Amino acid sequence: MNPTKNDLSEANRLKIVALCQERLADAIDLQTMSKQAHWNVKGPQFRALHELFDEIHTAMLGYIDLIAERAVQLGGQIEGTARSVAKRTSLPEYPLEARSCPDHVEAMSAVLATFGQGVRAAIGRSEDCDDADTADMFTEISRGVDMHLWMTESHKQQA
């Protein structure tokens, strides 16, 4: 840990940095999956999904920075390389064979839901470490992920 005058205990800072590392790996993985979907989606909903997946990508870039910088603010060192992410991610593998709009909607919904679940768990774990700031950050991320999940799932519902 790097020295800091942050008033959270070192034990709690260590836990939060580890938590941020977990969620960071998932966030980077989801960000790359959103581009996989963006580039490869085909079908009648192409334009809307192409743009939605790009919006998810942009949102994930912001979340990645929030998570990584929070860990560093607490004295941590972050690992954000592709190899590190591949070892650490808890998200399901994105189906590389997905081509159709329904296939990508289903796959993206699954990874967004799994990521959201992990982020919500991180809120409670942050609160357990008396870190309201990190809990608030994860709450912000959770709201955004839920919005993108809703927008994605809306493409599979019939009026």
Image (cartoon, rainbow, N blue to C red):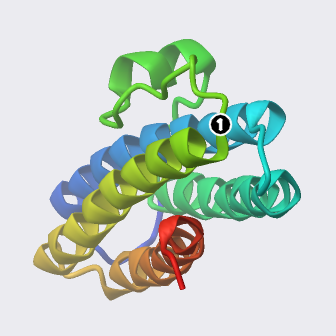
What is the quadrant of the C terminus in the image?
bottom right
Circle 1 crowding by C-alpha within 10 Å: few under 14, some 14–19, many from 20: some
**Which residue, as the protein is rendered here, is positioned at the far top?**
83
Q: Residue at x 47, y 83 (%)?
A: 143
Q: Which residue is mark 1?
A: 100
Decide: is 38 above or below 127.
Answer: above
Decide: is 88 above or below 3.
Answer: above
**Which residue, as the protein is rendered here, is positioned at the far left?**
128
Q: Is residue 18 left or right of residue 11?
A: right
Say which quarter of the image contains residue 80. top right
Q: Residue at x 20, y 66 (%)?
A: 121
Percent of width and height locating residue 7: 34, 78
Q: Residue at x 40, y 83 (%)?
A: 139
Question: In the image shown, does 39 or 143 lie closer to the viewer?
Answer: 39
**Regarding mark 1 in the picture, which secondary structure is present there?**
loop
Percent of width and height locating residue 31: 64, 44
Question: In the image shown, does 11 or 98 lie closer to the viewer?
Answer: 98
Percent of width and height locating residue 58: 78, 59
Work out whether residue 24 can be spotted.
Answer: no
Question: In the image shown, does 27 or 99 lie closer to the viewer?
Answer: 99
- Amino acid type, label 1: Ser
Label tally: 1
